[in-house]
């Protein structure tokens, strides 16, 4: 296969890629979603399945996705089209790229609404709204936010504009710099929160909830949610990491980068869990409170710790930045597709993709208030979108990425990119057999066939 160059630029270094991909991976998934789905699915056993999925499915598929991206060096659609042609495989492999573009668009439509909550909380904490607050006050404040579609829509609009602004300028400018400083800062703040959680008196209860597996609480759906989340949190299965890989300089080690990214991502998620569950138990709250979990627990902590308004404002601000650097990667595949295949300028592509996403987001805004009764299979519009994308589309996308990298791509191509040691053989065995089988079994189990 001949070497290709990306039309959209290249990262300035290996580290720039690792930072950007970590920026994509670390986001609302780690700090908002991981704690709340862990709470809903009973804790320890769920966390264990999630960790196994990261190691056995997530990391190998991340390597595969970056690899395909760097070989193809185009939008996920054109990368798959090109790689399939090179391998003389069925041209339908390009649909993998299409599903990815669609999934990114669907995810961003609700991701932006939740990021809007975080934006709203930056200002609430800044105004000292929660000082001395107890669980009821904090809950009432959150319910009040969800009840007003205008306010949710306003924050959703602002977040979408922020995202489009960066994407319009191209992934490199601005983004690299932001991630370099803000990610480490977020990490420090999380550490402070874990420190606070230790002082609540319920720290060990939180630790047990997270790490003591009770398999009787693990349903077939919980296993699916855990696996889906492994894809979601690592930004896998829809071409986001593929497109970032397509900007990766030739010499950088894909395997090493994948371990760094997955390691940092997992660490942030576990720290968020350690910060949140002790507060939940110390205040007699419900771990299964749902999507509002961090918005009804952390403000209690900030309201009752020294300099809480300052730390609280900073925390939600960093959360917004983490969400921002993730949102960019969700829309990047659609934008590169519009640029490559429809001849739009980057700015115009951004406007169209952003407008469509913003419109769909209104569905999620309404699902928390006026439209909370509109359900399908007992799920609101938001729940449905989340389930469909994270638990079905991403694992399916990941499954086909693994199959392509393991079975269709010529061995000499993957070997040349990844090196030929035992690590390479272990990776190849995993993407050929282990990851596809794991995804397949989880799918079957969740529809209660076995
Ligand atoms: N991984 C991000 C998070 O945890 C969300 C995200 C960004 C994502 N890009 C993605 C999820 C691509 C799936 C696919 O918040």
Image (cartoon, rainbow, N blue to C red):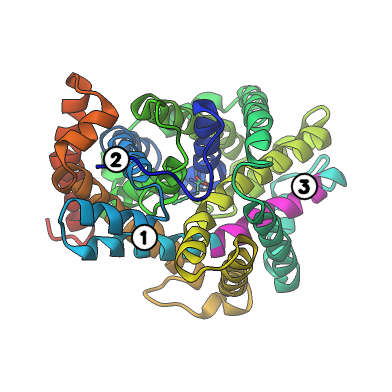
Q: Earlier in the sequence, mark 3 or mark 1?
A: 1
Q: Nearer the viewer, mark 3 or mark 1?
A: 1
Q: Are marks 2 and 3 in contact (CB under 8 Å)?
A: no
Q: Is residue 143 above or below residue 414?
A: below
- Quadrant containing the C terminus in the rendered view: bottom left
Which residue is pictured at 38% across the width and 27% down the height? 259
Q: Is residue 132 left or right of residue 351?
A: right
Residue labelled with disc 3: 122
Query: Where does the magenta region start and end?
Result: 109-125
Mark drawn on residue 64: 2
Which one is nearer the viewer's eye here, 131 or 382?
382
**Figure label count:** 3
Mark drawn on residue 77: 1
Where disc 2 sits, the SS reads helix
Q: Tell me the CA gap for discs 1 and 2.
A: 16 Å
Q: Is residue 449 above or below residue 7?
A: below
Which one is nearer the viewer's eye here, 365 or 71?
71
Residue 287: % across, % down: 51, 45
Quadrant assignment, res 392: bottom left
């Amino acid at each position: 296969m001949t070497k290709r160059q990306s039309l959209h630029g290249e990262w300035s270094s290996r580290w720039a890629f690792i930072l950007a991909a970590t920026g994509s991976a670390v986001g609302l998934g780690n700090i908002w979603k991981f704690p709340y789905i862990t709470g809903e699915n009973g804790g320890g056993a769920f966390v264990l399945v999630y960790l196994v999925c990261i190691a056995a499915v997530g990391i190998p598929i991340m390597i595969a996705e970056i690899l395909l991206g760097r070989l193809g060096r185009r939008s996920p659609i054109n990368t798959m089209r090109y790689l399939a042609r090179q391998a003389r495989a069925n041209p339908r492999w390009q649909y993998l790229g299409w599903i990815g573009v669609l999934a990114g668009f669907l995810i961003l439509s609700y991701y932006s609404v939740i990021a809007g909550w975080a934006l709203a909380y930056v200002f609430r904490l800044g105004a000292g709204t929660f000082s001395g607050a107890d669980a009821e006050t904090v809950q009432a404040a959150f319910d009040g936010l969800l009840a007003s579609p205008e306010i949710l829509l306003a924050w959703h609009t602002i977040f979408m504009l922020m995202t489009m602004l960066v994407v319009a300028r191209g992934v490199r400018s601005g983004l690299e710099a932001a991630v370099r400083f803000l990610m480490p800062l977020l990490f420090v703040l999380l550490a402070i929160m874990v420190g606070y959680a230790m002082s609540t008196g319920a720290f060990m209860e939180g630790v047990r909830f997270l790490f003591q597996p009770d398999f009787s609480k693990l349903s077939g759906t919980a296993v699916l949610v855990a696996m889906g989340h492994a894809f979601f949190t690592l930004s896998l299965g829809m071409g986001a990491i593929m497109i970032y890989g397509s900007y990766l300089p030739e010499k950088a080690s894909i395997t090493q980068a994948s371990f760094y990214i997955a390691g940092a991502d997992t660490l942030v998620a576990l720290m968020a869990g350690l910060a949140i569950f002790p507060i939940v138990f110390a205040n007699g709250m419900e771990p299964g409170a749902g999507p509002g979990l961090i918005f009804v627990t952390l403000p209690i902590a900030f309201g009752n710790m020294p300099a809480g308004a300052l730390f609280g404002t900073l925390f939600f601000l960093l959360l917004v930045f983490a969400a921002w650097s993730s949102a960019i990667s969700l829309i990047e595949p659609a934008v590169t597709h519009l640029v490559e295949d429809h001849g739009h300028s980057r700015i115009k592509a951004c406007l169209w993709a952003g407008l469509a996403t913003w419109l769909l987001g209104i569905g999620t805004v309404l699902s928390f208030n006026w439209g909370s009764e509109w359900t399908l299979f007992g799920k609101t519009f938001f729940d449905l979108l989340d389930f469909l994308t994270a638990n079905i589309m991403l694992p399916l996308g990941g499954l086909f990425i693994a199959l392509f990298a393991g079975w269709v791509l010529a061995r000499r191509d993957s070997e040349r990119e990844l090196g030929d040691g035992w690590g390479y053989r272990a990776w190849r065995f995993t993407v050929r057999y282990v990851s596809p089988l794991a995804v397949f079994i989880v799918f079957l189990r969740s529809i209660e066939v076995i």
